[in-house]
Amino acid sequence: MVKLTVDSRDSSVPQSTQAELMMVYLAYAEDEQRQHYLALQVCRGTNLYEALGQAGWLEKFSELAEWCEQVTDIATPTAKRWHVGIYAQKQPLSYLLQPFDRIEVYRSLSADPMSQRKNKSRG
């Protein structure tokens, strides 16, 4: 279990600016062994793509950055291999974040879960 703690009181940020800030969370299970969680303060009006950039995840995860570049103009996430969402709901990169949203980065599955269950039941 991972416990996230964040002190949202930053004395270097003026109080009027703090009122415009909101907390969002990012989660990415790169694989079974490597999982990334981050609490991030962003300004109201920040979209999903901007938050990924502010978190440094576009630099850290090149495959995520490449994918984002390919789909940046798509307004409706219809692709089966969509890689980002909010609380397990696929969202476009232009989605405006709400306070306490959980941004989730999805990875491609190596095998279809339904096929795996069928194979287990046969064997």
Image (cartoon, rainbow, N blue to C red):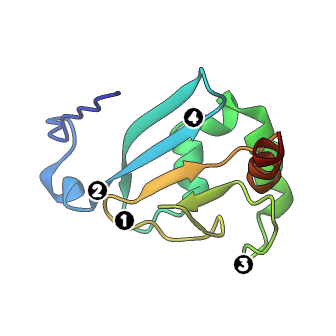
On the picture, is 66 further left or further right than 43?
right
Which residue shows up at 28% across the image and 56% down it? 21
Instruction: Look at the image and tell me in which quarter the C terminus lies.
Output: top right
Say few, some or many: other residues with alpha carbon within 10 Å of mark 2 (under 14 / 14 to 19 / 20 or more): some
Expressed as whole percent of the image width and height from the top left, the position of residue 109 reads 77, 44
- Identify the image quadrant of residue 5: top left
Q: CA distance from mark 4 to mark 3?
A: 23 Å
Q: CA distance from mark 2 to mark 4?
A: 18 Å
In terms of depth relative to the viewer, which is nearer, 86 or 10? 86
Say few, some or many: other residues with alpha carbon within 10 Å of mark 3 (under 14 / 14 to 19 / 20 or more): few
Q: Secondary structure at mark 2?
A: strand
Q: CA distance from mark 3 to mark 2?
A: 25 Å
Q: Earlier in the sequence, mark 1 or mark 3?
A: 1
Location of mark 2 (residue): 21
Q: Earlier in the sequence, mark 2 or mark 4?
A: 2
Q: Is residue 93 above or below residue 76?
A: above
Q: Amino acid at mark 1?
A: Arg
Say few, some or many: other residues with alpha carbon within 10 Å of mark 4 (under 14 / 14 to 19 / 20 or more): few
Which residue shows up at 18% across the image and 34% down it? 7
